Image: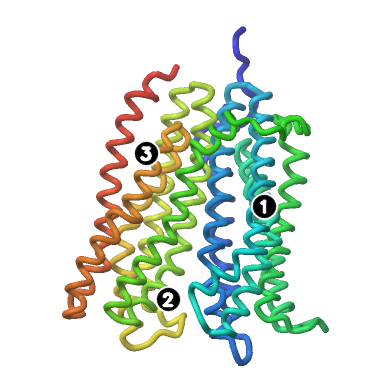
Amino acid sequence: MEQKEPKNKMGTEPINKLMLSMGIPMVLSMMLQAVYNIVDSAFVSNMAGNGELALNALTLAFPVQMLMVAIGIGTGVGTNALLAKSIGQGNKQKASQVAGNAIFLAIIIFIVYFLFGCFGVEPYIASQTQNVQIKVMAEEYLGICCKISMGIVFFSIFEKLLQATGRSMYSTTAQIAGAVVNVILDPILIYGWCGLPEMGVKGAAYATVIGQIVSALLGLIFHLKFNKEIENNVRYLKPSLRTIGEIYTIGLPAIIAQALMSVMTYGLNIIFVRIGESVVTAYGLYYKIQQFILFAAFGLRDAITPIISFNHGMRSKKRVQQGIKYGLTYTLIVMFVGLVVIEIFAAPFARLFGLSGETETLCVQAMRIVSLSFLFAGVNIAYQGIFQALDAGLQSLVISVCRQILFVLPVAWGFSLLACQSMDYMWLVWFTFFIAEGLSAVIGTVFMLQINKKVIKNLA
C-alpha cells in the first residue's frame, strides 16, 4: 500500500520556517530556565543571618538535581526522536506505544527518586559536609525535591511528546508558567510574605516543586488536547522491552552527556582550587553567565532532533539535508551573537556579580578567552541533535565525552601546572575550552561525513 503524505507540519512546512517556529520557543524556554535558576540562588543567598550557609546547602544538592534533569532529558530525547520517526512513517500504533511506554518510564523514575528522597539524601549530604546547620538545610531541600519530583519527571516526558509533534509552543507555555510560579512563590515562601510562615530553604524547595507540578499538569492537558497523532489508552502503558530499548538507545547518550556536565565542573573545581580560590569563583560565575548562550543552543538542538527524525522516518533525503543545513546555520548564528555580547560586556557582567580585584580580572579574562570556543561548541551541540535524530546515539555520546571530559580535564590539569608557578600562564588554562571544542568539532565532522555516506545518501 502506498504511504500517504503526512499532514503534520513536520513533513510539509518549509524547513527553515519550521526550524524557527519550533526553535524560538525552545530557545526562550531554555534561557528562562537559566534565568530563574539564578533568581532562586539570589533569593536564598539573601536570607537574613544564614544566607551564605543556605546557598552552600543548595550547592551540595545541585549534583543530584542535575542527575534528575539528565535522566528526564535523556528519556525525553529518546522518546522525542522515536515518536517523531514513527509519526513520520505514518505508524500511529507505534507512536502511541512509544508515548505510553514513556509515561510508564516516568512512573518508574519517580518511584526511584522518591525512595532516594526517603533513604539516600542523608548519607549523600553527610559525605560532603560535617557542618550540622548546612546538613540540615541541604537534607530538607533535597528531600522535598526528590519526594515531590513527579512534576519534573512527567514534564520532561510531556514536553518531548509535544515537541515531537511540532507543538513546541505549548511545551514552552507550560514551562514558562511553572517558572513564573516558582519565581513568585520563592520570596513568599522563603521570607514568609503574605502572612505565611518563614520557611527558608524548605520554602525554596516547595516553590520549585510546585512550579514543576504546574508545568507537568499543563503539559498533560496540552498533550491530551492537541496530540491527535497519538492514541492515549491504558493498554499502551504496558511496558515493551523493545520500545524501551529503542528509547534508551537514542536517549542514553543524552543522559550521559548531561551528567558529564556535572563531572566536568566537579573535576575543574578540583584542578582550579590548586591554583587559587579566586580561580574557582571566577569560573563558577562565568559558568552561570555562559549558560544563557549554551542553553539557547540546547533549545535549537531540541528542535533539530524531532525535525530531522520525522523526515528521516519519511525517508525524505531533501528535508533531512535541509534540517542539517538550517540546524547548523541557526545554531552558529546564536553562538556568534553570544560571542559578540560576552566579548563586549565582559567587564560589566563581572561587576554585576559584585566582583572586584583579582577575581574580577580572572572572570573577565575567562569570558573573553573561553567565549572564543563558542562557534566550535555550536557545531558540536548541533551535531549531537543531528546524530540523535539519525539513530547515531554512539557518535553523539563520543562528542559529549570528548568536549566535556577527554579534551578538557587532562589539558586543564597540564596547563594548571604552569599557572601554579605563575598566573601569567592562566590564559592557557582558559584556552583549554577552545582546544577541547575545536578537536571535538573535527571528530564530529568526520562522523557527519560517514553518516551522510551510509545513511542520508540512501534515503529516497
**Label ID, residue 395:** 3
Q: Is residue 52 left or right of residue 183?
A: left
Dividing the image into 4 quarters, which one contains the N terminus? top right
First in sequence: mark 1 vs mark 2: 1
Residue 283 can be seen, yes or no:
yes
- Does residue 379 appear to the left or right of 385 in the view shown? left
**Label 1, residues with CA under 10 Å away: few <14, some 14-19, many ≥20:** many
The quadrant holding residue 317 is top left
State the residue position of label 1: 110
Mark 2 vs 3, N-terminal side: 2
Tell me the residue at 61%/43% (across/down). Answer: 160
Residue labelled with disc 2: 349
Of residue 238 and residue 206, the one placed in the foreground of this image is 238
Amino acid bearing label 3: Gln
* Mark with earlier residue (3, 1): 1
Q: Residue furthest top?
A: 1
Closer to the eye: label 3 or 1: 1
